Amino acid sequence: MNTRKQTELIVALDVNSQVEMIRAIELLPVDIQWVKVGLELFCAEGPSILLPLRDRNLSVFLDLKLHDIPKTVEKAVKSASKHGVQLLTIHASGSREMIRAACVAAREFGQNGPKILAVTALTSLQDSDLKDIGVQRGMSEQVRALAQLAVDAGADGLVCSPLETALLRRELGEKPLLVTPGIRSQKDELGDQKRTLSAVDAVRAGATHLVVGRPILAAADPARAAAELLSEIRAASAS
Ligand code: C5P
């Protein structure tokens, strides 16, 4: 049983302009509280893209996957924190010092600062990619090691594939946020997602936030698809 508070649904706004973004959010039911802004939209429109989201009282996951020297990441986190976002990603492989610098920077903003999420190994990587960059251990060991490093260095949580969620929850305990993309029901198109779980199974595995893009925004009726997912998540969180 999931003893945490209710798992949140985050809608990934994977579009490339403000016009498309507004169109997308106007299709969503009013009880959607979270959206994700990624690199494509942020690079296209800049930080002003966050204003219409704030005006609508939406909570924002800003998925910038920062990875640089600690000082640069610290300054980037401060700049991002000024925009009032709630979740922000960095790469765990950037080092203990870089993760710490990001967390210290975010905490300067107190309750208004973002929670820092660490990305362990991108799900697009395979063992051979790790070998190419000199990492000899296999993927699951790499994910576990980077997850532990990130949490030890102060990260509030991790972005993880749905198939890693249960393992990371067992290993890291109840505290870290576990933010999980790759959610698909049996009727959804897989698209380029290969390792998927249903929303209900991801909640049961211990995810605190589910990130869903195409199953909502590419649905024939996005409002209905989002409402159905929300009610499945609420039911699974309560059971
Ligand atoms: O459309 P879909 O539901 O696959 O969207 C999932 C979102 O989560 C996309 O924004 C994608 O970039 C992101 N993501 C992912 N897998 C990861 C990390 C992020 O699918 N490992």
Image (cartoon, grey):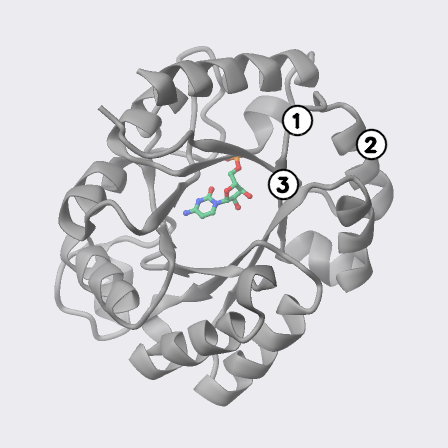
Residue 68 vs residue 77: left or right? left
* Outermost right residue: 19
CB under 8 Å between callouts 3 and 1?
no
Q: Real-space Cα distance between discs 2 and 3? A: 14 Å
**Is the residue 221 above or below the residue 3 in the image?**
above
Q: Which of 221 and 169 is in front in this view?
A: 169
User: Tag 2: Cα neighbours inside 10 Å, few (<14), some, or many (≥20)?
Assistant: few
Amino acid carrying mark 3 in the image: Val
User: Tag 1: Cα neighbours inside 10 Å, few (<14), some, or many (≥20)?
Assistant: many
Q: Real-space Cα distance between discs 2 and 1? A: 10 Å
* Whether residue 46 can be seen here: no
* Whether residue 126 can be seen here: yes
Sequence order check, earlier mark of 3 and 1 = 3
Q: Real-space Cα distance between discs 3 and 1? A: 12 Å
Amino acid carrying mark 1 in the image: Leu
Ligand 1 within 8 A of label 3's CB?
no
Q: Which residue is drawn at 28% across and 50% down?
A: 175
Q: SS at mark 3?
A: strand
Residue topped by disc 2: 23
Circle 3 or circle 1, nearest the eye: 3
Residue topped by disc 1: 217
Q: SS at mark 2?
A: helix
Where does the N terminus fall, quadrant-wise? Answer: top left
**Residue 192 position within the rendered picture, expressed as x and y whole percent measured from the top left:** 46, 35
**Residue 90 position within the rendered picture, expressed as x and y whole percent measured from the top left:** 46, 66
Residue topped by disc 3: 35
**Is the residue 58 above or below the residue 202 in the image?**
below
Circle 2 or circle 3, nearest the eye: 3
Q: In which quarter of the image is residue 198?
A: top left
Q: Residue at x 24, y 42 (%)?
A: 164
Amino acid carrying mark 2 in the image: Arg
